[in-house]
Image (cartoon, helix red, strand yellow):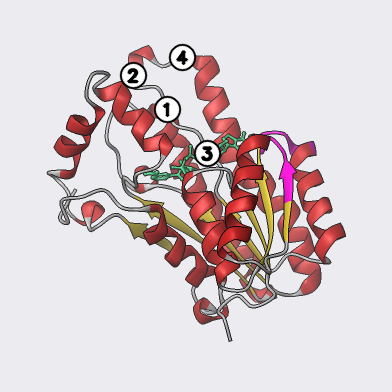
Amino acid sequence: MPMLEQQIIIVTGAASGLGRAAAIRCATDGARLSLVDVNRAGLDDVKAEVIASCAKADVLTVEADVSSEDQVRAYVEQTVARFGGVDGFFNNAGIEDRQATTQDVDGAFFDRIMAVNARGVLFGMKHVLKVMATQGHGRIVNTASALGIRGAGRQAGYTASKHAIVGLTRNAALEYGALGIGINAIAPGAILTPLVESSLRQVDPHDWQAAASTFVAHNPMRRLGTPDEVASVVAFLLSADAAFVNGAVIPIDGGQSAQY
Ligand code: NAD
């Protein structure tokens, strides 16, 4: 039987990058999907891609900003109204930082990145966990980052927000394990998505691929990761095969975080 057969899975940040790849992978593994993003056109494109790769996929799309608790409550309610519950939650939407040293951090942007990356993950867990606690089962994967467990410099807001996600993950895992709910985080290194390309363009506006080459020279595997290499780990963590994995923070970074 496919790993996620008939599982009801919410993916936030589903219109691009890691969320898009996870949506396609989970549908291929048999899941029914609720895809959430601020980008309506991107959601429509990804829904079409999911159905192209998996004709019988059952897909709901919900336009929502994860930094708004009302919109988070609404995407959870719409998912339950359509499918009757939530078995898995890939709590993934996030935004990148502006490259700046700490003395140049912009307060308004710091608040925004915390609102999307950290509060968005917290509100997502808050409303999904109400459903999962009633069901007595569920699995959550929060997207942290290598910058949730290490530092790199020039990314104060992003690093703070991703460390917050690690803390929120460990805290909730302790609260809900006894209810049969597993809550983990992934800590991807540099995975080639629009977000990373945009960050590399900030590092070298003239040649982002040169910036990428410099970056990967320090990676044990000497390359960027691919979204599919993250999606396969996410699908595993959302599945019953990972039933006793709880409160873990899983690096997906070619070994980069092992050497800092
Ligand atoms: P991406 O930019 O390709 O995709 C992010 C998606 O999130 C977009 O579709 C965007 O519209 C959506 N989004 C942004 N703000 C939102 C909001 N307020 N409400 C709802 N949706 C919103 O980026 P990605 O690389 O796929 O990143 C996905 C997650 O992975 C992020 O949390 C990011 O921090 C994290 N991450 C990425 C990498 C990497 O190397 N790509 C590494 C570590 C962590």
Q: Quick check: 106 above or below 133?
A: above
- Reading the image, the residue beneath label 2 is 100
State the CA–CA distance, disc 2 to disc 4.
9 Å
Is residue 170 visible in the rendered image? The answer is no
Percent across and percent down for residue 52 are: 59, 59
Q: Secondary structure at mark 3?
A: loop
Percent across and percent down for residue 223 are: 20, 50
State the CA–CA distance, disc 2 to disc 3.
18 Å
What stretch of residues is rendered in magenta?
Answer: 61-70
- Reading the image, the residue beneath label 1 is 97
Is residue 132 visible in the rendered image? The answer is yes
| Type of amino acid under label 3 | Gly
Task: Return the mark for residue 106.
Answer: 4
Ligand 1 has an atom within 8 Å of the beta carbon of the residue at disc 3: yes
Q: Quick check: 9 above or below 154?
A: below
Percent across and percent down for residue 3 are: 55, 79
Which of the two marks, 2 or 3, is nearer to us in this view?
Answer: 3
Q: Secondary structure at mark 1?
A: loop
- Reading the image, the residue beneath label 3 is 94
Whether label 1 touches label 2, CB < 8 Å: yes
Ligand 1 has an atom within 8 Å of the beta carbon of the residue at disc 4: no
